[in-house]
Image: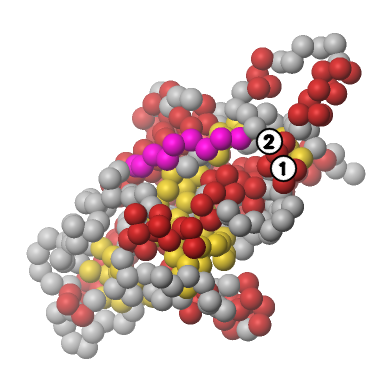
Amino acid sequence: MAAPHDEAAAWSEEAARRVWAGAVPLQVHLHDADVTALPPPPPFLTLGPRIGYLPLLIPVIKAHFSSALPPGVDTVWFEYKGLPLKWYVPIGVLFDLLCMRSRKTMESNSKAAFSLLLLYVHFRGYPSEILSPCEGEDSVKWSYMTSLKEATFIITGNSKSVMNMSHADQVALWESVMKGNVDGYKNISTRLKLGPFEDDGLVRTASAERQRQQNSDEPESPGSSKPCRVPVRLYVRNVQEDLEYIEDAVPVSDWEGVSYINRPFEIRKVEGRSYITLEHALQTLLPEFFSSKPAGALDSAADSSDTTNSSRSSQEAEQALASPREAGAAKKARVKLVRVQGIELDMDIPFLWVASNLKNPDYYLHICVYVGTRKQ
């Protein structure tokens, strides 16, 4: 019989492989404004890696539409229902945020469980007032390495392990992300010593701590009080509160309707018998949407943990925090749906297990949150 630690390690490895193997069905059309030949070319169908980025698909997409493209210099960008897509957001996150089915829909209609992301690709007219410049793979690599440095700083307090990587290791790490090579990625990333986070996701209660000290003559190890900090990237989308099905929500018309938030989750003591659940973590990360929690929900966990949320930071100016309009609406909002890697997780799942096993290659845990807002 396998030891509990070995079984947990096997589950974690399986979860990582499923995350890396995850893909989103894409149907890409050449926008009418870029079509120079009749009849228009057929759409391009492909599977976009959940952990990948749209600009990395440009070479194969351009080859498909090459016979119909206008002359001149390419400035490629993608659009979904009129919304220019931010190229540095992983494909899986874009899907979860813009084109997701609820568990209720999938359980009532098996055909509805399949959904694809229908995109339009443009080769001209880059909306520089909305999107930051993208020079193809180089820009995506820079964005990825920047996120990895940020996550490393959050976890360890500095980014030396990434800054000190050899050029060969940086190239190997990036190529493993581009190619979806999880084994190659692990070979390099384990040298950064960034995880996993505490496997059990437990936090010691004050009473349990006092009892432990009374029953033990051993001094507490220096590292036991070191904070555990989890890099979290939240995408909060407002939808109508009275929606029965999430897919009936009004499409996102501009990025003002989505809050892009970096807000690390910090746990100062990780021991004991009280789980830190996904719900508890979200209550801490987004308290404005959990002000009216059910009576008694998570009270013991909330009271027993010594947690804080750090000040939010941004990768660049356009990755905006909640707008004043959204901040005002937060008081009249509640969480309707939470997605991580395309999964509608149970809210009582241990948060640190989620962070360790469902994170992206940049070591961020990307969480999509649908918030129901009452009409003003």
Q: Which of 152 and 285 is in front in this view?
A: 285
* Coordinates of residue 341 in the picture (x, y in percent): 55, 58
Residue drawn at point x = 37 percent, y = 49 percent: 321
Is residue 314 left or right of 67 when viewed as pictured?
Answer: right
Label 1 environment density (alpha carbons within 10 Å; few <14, some 14–19, many ≥20): some
Q: Is residue 311 magenta?
A: yes
Q: Nearer the viewer, residue 162 or 343?
A: 343
Q: Is residue 204 above or below residue 63?
A: above
Distance from the alpha carbon under mark 2 to that under mark 1 = 6 Å
Q: Write down the region rendered in magenta.
A: 307-315
Q: In which quarter of the image is the C terminus?
A: bottom left
Residue drawn at point x = 26 percent, y = 81 percent: 41
Residue type at the position of mark 1:
Ala
As drawn, the label of residue 24 is none
Q: Can residue 116 be seen in this view?
A: no
Is residue 219 left or right of 165 when viewed as pictured?
Answer: right
Q: On the image, which quarter does residue 83 sit in?
A: bottom left
Question: Secondary structure under badge 2?
Answer: loop
Residue drawn at point x = 82 percent, y = 29 percent: 208
* Coordinates of residue 154 in the picture (x, y in percent): 48, 32
Residue drawn at point x = 48 percent, y = 25 percent: 157
Q: Which of 355 and 173 is in front in this view?
A: 355
Q: Is residue 235 above or below residue 195?
A: below
Q: Mark 2 points at which residue?
A: 305
Q: Nearer the viewer, residue 75 or 292?
A: 292
Q: Main secondary structure of the magenta part?
A: loop
Question: Is mark 2 in CB contact (under 8 Å) with mark 1?
Answer: yes
Q: Is residue 90 above or below residue 161?
A: below
* Coordinates of residue 185 in the picture (x, y in percent): 51, 41
Q: Mark 1 points at which residue?
A: 301
Residue type at the position of mark 2:
Ser
